[in-house]
Amino acid sequence: MMLPAVVWIEMLRSLAGFCLVQAVDSQVCPIGDELCRSKTIPLHSAAAMQTRMRSFAVVPQPSWLSTELIDETEPAGYEFRGEYRDLKLWTLTGTETGSAVWIVELQNETQLQEEKARAKSNGLTILLDSHVSLVISGDVPEVLGYDACGGETDKTVISVPDFALQVLPKVVAPGYAAVAKETQIEALVGEVTITSLMSTDEKLASYNSRNSDPGSNFMEALAWAETELQNSGFTVERDVFKPTSSGLRGKELTQLIAEVKGTVDPDTIVVFGAHLDSRATREISAKQRAPGGDDNGSGSSILLEFAKAVKATGAKFEYTVRLCLFNGEEQGLHGSRALAKKWKSDRVKIAAMVNVDMVAYKRDSDPLAVTLMDGQTNAAKTQEAEDIAIEYLGAKVLRAPASACCSDQQSFTEQGFVAVGFFETPAMNNPNYHQESDEPTTLNTTLFELQCKASFAAVATFAKMVAGGANPTPIAPPTEPTPPTPPTAAPPPTAAPPPTPPREGKNYSSSSFKIGVVPNEADDEVDDEVDDEGLEE
């Protein structure tokens, strides 16, 4: 049997902790046609090994392994750890790294070699070097100054799950009919007001820090959000988990799950998620001020406003809608990964996951647009979300590049669920990102309202909001005309009352923002002027 020139690697599991490796650059298989056809080398005896494998060398079996994206082969004895831009990642079953593992996707070979040298000089362990990607073990964001959420301009930094994933076929979202406006969804979207949104965001930012460190004010913010969800009629539970990597390893963290049951198929679920935790310059800190107005007070506020809108309209859905306020996102998607893994194991039927993270900042020069992530999302469902935004809001829609990938939708994509991610402008350009200055006063209120309405429409569509499942303002019935009354003499004029002095504080208004209309850029300047004082309590 003639073989092309290839590099052939075969591993014999019968030698504990070792494998036999040979590089073959030949047109003829050196150990016989039958063995080459099976690509399996039986080890019958030491004599057989000496006879057939004189050229093989015994080397340690690698703990980490990468394969090509198009390769459907699963390496025996290895666990799958995800598919990334350049590779599929595997680890030897039972491997314990003792620290977090990260993939850094770079632009070219020169950049790769520079980052590789920098990582080594800082005491980090390079596990793999494949194409122009590095797999690194250690506190990579802290040591190399990377953003743990992927917000780099020239590289993508992605946390690797610390547990095995199933190798799943490519997920194809079911087809959908052309999007057409539905009255009940319009009523739900119409409940959004910037006044209420900003009030919620300011309340979340009023806690000194929502950092995942158990010593922060996170639990106070969570308790307040819990009450808000319960007051909106949602069934609420706390989910407690312990991260197995990063500086939070072994610490007990809490996150919220709230849901309203579907009326037709309650076992099918649409997840609407946002991370409640915040951070500033320190990844883990109980005391550093971390208001998280945009990251991710904006997304968390949208979830809480959705619950209020459901109550106000009496909205009902065919599917169950499950709201999740995640914890531990900033240190590597810990909370969402714990839930997605559990729900996959429990065979929970999730029709779609919609994530909202950092959706309310834009520079004056940036376009006003709904932005959807491309990275770690389902392309077909993302396209549907785009069509929904255009249909209901007449909105311009942009796509965030893959470098803005690493929010909680990734956790669901990893488990084979269909996921969509709302984001702000395609580039990570918020100067207050992971800073103590990430206050509500820096947000663009017009963009905030637009993104909120777009995500509401997407969730309501995916969950199949029931016709008549919202209560619009009733129209008064016509009455019989009454005969005119004769005119009466006009009373003498009275003095006009003195003007009422203006109310202190900022009164946020939707002003020109209406469903189906994109405000003019000039209107942004009005809505952007948010006082440092915020809303009156």
Image: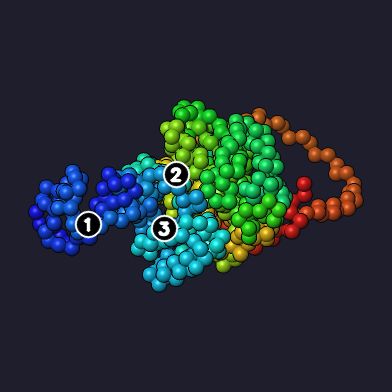
Q: Secondary structure at mark 3?
A: strand
Residue located 11% across and 52% down the image: 32
Residue picked out by circle 1:
56
Q: Secondary structure at mark 2?
A: loop
User: Around disc 3, counting alpha carbons within 10 Å, would you say few (fewer than 14), some (14 to 19), or many (20 or more)?
Assistant: some
In the image, what residue type sits under mark 2?
Phe
In this rendering, the answer to whether 411 lies above or below 239 is below
Mark earlier in primary sequence (2, 1): 1
Rendered image: mark on residue 163: 2
Rendered image: mark on residue 127: 3
Task: Judge by depth and name the residue closer to the eye, 339 or 376.
Answer: 339
Report whether residue 178 is seen: no
* Left or right, 107 with reference to 301: left
Give coordinates of residue 486: x percent, y percent: 79, 36
Task: Judge by depth and name the residue closer to the eye, 391 or 458.
Answer: 458
Task: Give the alpha-carbon distance from disc 3 to disc 2, as whole Å.
Answer: 16 Å
Q: Quadrant of the N terminus?
A: bottom left
- Which marked residue is nearer to the observer: mark 2 or mark 1? 1
Residue located 44% across and 66% down the image: 116
